[in-house]
Image: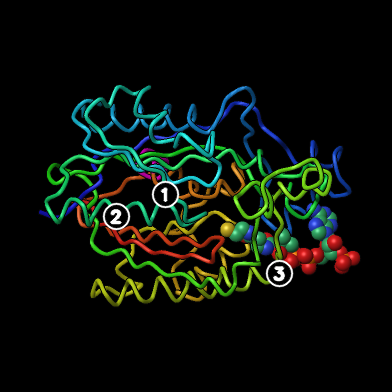
């Protein structure tokens, strides 16, 4: 009774923020952004919010799975940009999609949230607690970004992805999920104000403490090392080698990070699925969106293995290996 993903969906807002738009906003250039990050465009939510994007992705995943919303047992939402502190975003999504029998909870593991959600879904299903789970990753990163700060505003974008996970049916078997964290590096990526330690005030807002602050260089090094190590751990746990991987979906943080992981793991570049050039870093949503696009754009055959590896603030990291039935 292995847990499996039987449907996926994603949603990207229409507004495109290009490198030339960013050239008008901060002291940067298309050449600098492309050479340092591989990013050209990202999507920005205008007049729509984290829950709205999550609802669109959730409805698409339910349709793809052929599952009625009222049959869902629990909705798990991975986000670090919830609509509100309370209520949780999962409850907003539950009401809108009509999952009247579902429990609803948000999970915060930054960019690793979707894979943490896969691990939790696998545990719920394989313990026999729930049979049908809706996992949604949705992020409005533009709400945390200071568009005067060239070190962060070029990187992040908005979007959502979702998956329906069940105990039966055709799909992607969730073989193993390996999770990790290192809270000693918490200072590398933070939003200092707006939580209970430092509630937002006029002073914190004037000091821009409600925006994301990032040590890019250190984060970069950890991202490569942690995703490589986590991928190796999960391959070993699954009894697989790099050669058994048909597709790899790394967190879409930066093309240089993605290429470095592929190289270290000796996974050919054409097997590494990328959306970073068109959507930037959409945090928890990045792998959820990429998985949906991979399944719809490429041929994934029976017994093909997909390795997904994520890294984010916390620090947190995770790798999942799934196999097409
Ligand atoms: N445009 C032009 N110049 C920029 C710039 C921009 N958007 N952002 C920074 N610079 C400048 C810096 O000020 C610095 O100038 P200096 O040498 O005069 O001091 C120079 O470019 C080099 O900056 P540096 O930070 O060393 O660049 P980098 O090669 O490390 O690239 C990142 C910066 C942010 C792209 C890169 O570190 C990165 O992607 N880190 C990981 C971030 C991440 O993935 N975060 C999310 C994790 S889930």
Q: Quadrant of ligand 1?
A: bottom right
User: Cβ–Cβ below 8 Å for labels 2 and 1?
Assistant: yes
Numbered tag placed on residue 29 in the rendering? none
Compared to residue 78, the image places residue 250 above or below, namely below
Whole-angstrom CA distance, mark 3 to mark 2, is: 31 Å
Q: Position of residue 97 (x, y in %)?
A: 34, 23
Compared to residue 287, the image places residue 313 above or below, namely below
Compared to residue 297, the image places residue 240 above or below, namely below
Q: Is mark 2 within 8 Å of ligand 1?
A: no
Q: Secondary structure at mark 1?
A: strand
Residue identified by numbered label 2? 120
Q: Earlier in the sequence, mark 3 or mark 2?
A: 2
Q: Which residues are magenta?
A: 292-297
Mark 1 or 3, closer to the camera: 1
Q: Position of residue 99 (x, y in %)?
A: 27, 27
User: Cβ–Cβ below 8 Å for labels 1 and 3?
Assistant: no
Residue identified by numbered label 3? 217
Mark 3 or 2, closer to the camera: 2
Q: Secondary structure at mark 2?
A: helix
Q: Earlier in the sequence, mark 2 or mark 1?
A: 1
Compared to residue 156, the image places residue 322 above or below, namely below
Numbered tag placed on residue 107 in the rendering? 1
Name the one closer to the observer, 245 or 108: 108
Q: Position of residue 241 (x, y in %)?
A: 31, 75
Q: Earlier in the sequence, mark 1 or mark 3?
A: 1
In the shown orientation, is residue 323 left or right of residue 151?
left
């Amino acid at each position: 009774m292995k847990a499996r993903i039987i449907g996926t969906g994603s949603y990207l807002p229409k507004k495109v923020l290009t490198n030339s738009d960013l050239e008008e906003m901060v002291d940067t250039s298309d050449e600098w952004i492309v050479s340092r990050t591989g990013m050209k465009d990202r999507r920005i939510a205008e007049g729509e919010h984290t829950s709205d994007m999550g609802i669109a992705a959730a409805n698409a995943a339910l349709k793809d799975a052929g599952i009625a919303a009222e049959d869902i047992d629990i909705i798990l939402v991975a986000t670090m940009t919830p609509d509100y502190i309370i209520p949780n975003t999962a409850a907003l999504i539950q009401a809108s999609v009509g999952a009247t029998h579902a429990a609803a909870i948000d999970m915060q593991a930054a960019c690793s949230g979707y894979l943490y959600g896969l691990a939790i879904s696998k545990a719920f299903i394989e313990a026999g607690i729930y049979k049908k789970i809706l996992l949604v990753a949705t992020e409005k990163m533009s709400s945390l970004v200071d568009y005067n700060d060239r070190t962060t505003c070029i990187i992040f974008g908005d979007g959502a992805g979702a998956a329906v996970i069940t105990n039966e049916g055709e799909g992607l078997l969730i073989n193993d999920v390996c999770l990790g964290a290192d809270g000693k590096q918490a200072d590398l990526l933070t939003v200092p104000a707006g939580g209970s330690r430092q509630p937002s005030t006029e002073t914190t807002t004037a000091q821009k403490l409600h925006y994301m602050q990032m040590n890019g260089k250190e984060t970069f090094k950890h991202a490569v090392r942690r995703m490589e190590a986590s991928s190796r751990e999960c391959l070993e746990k699954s009894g697989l080698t790099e050669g058994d991987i048909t597709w790899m979906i790394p967190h879409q943080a930066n093309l240089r990070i993605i290429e470095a992981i592929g190289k270290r793991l000796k996974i050919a570049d054409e097997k590494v699925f990328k959306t970073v050039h068109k959507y930037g870093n959409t945090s928890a949503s990045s792998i959820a969106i990429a998985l949906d696009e991979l399944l719809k754009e490429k041929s994934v055959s029976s017994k093909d293995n997909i390795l997904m590896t994520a890294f984010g603030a916390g620090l947190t990291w995770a790798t999942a290996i799934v196999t097409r039935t």
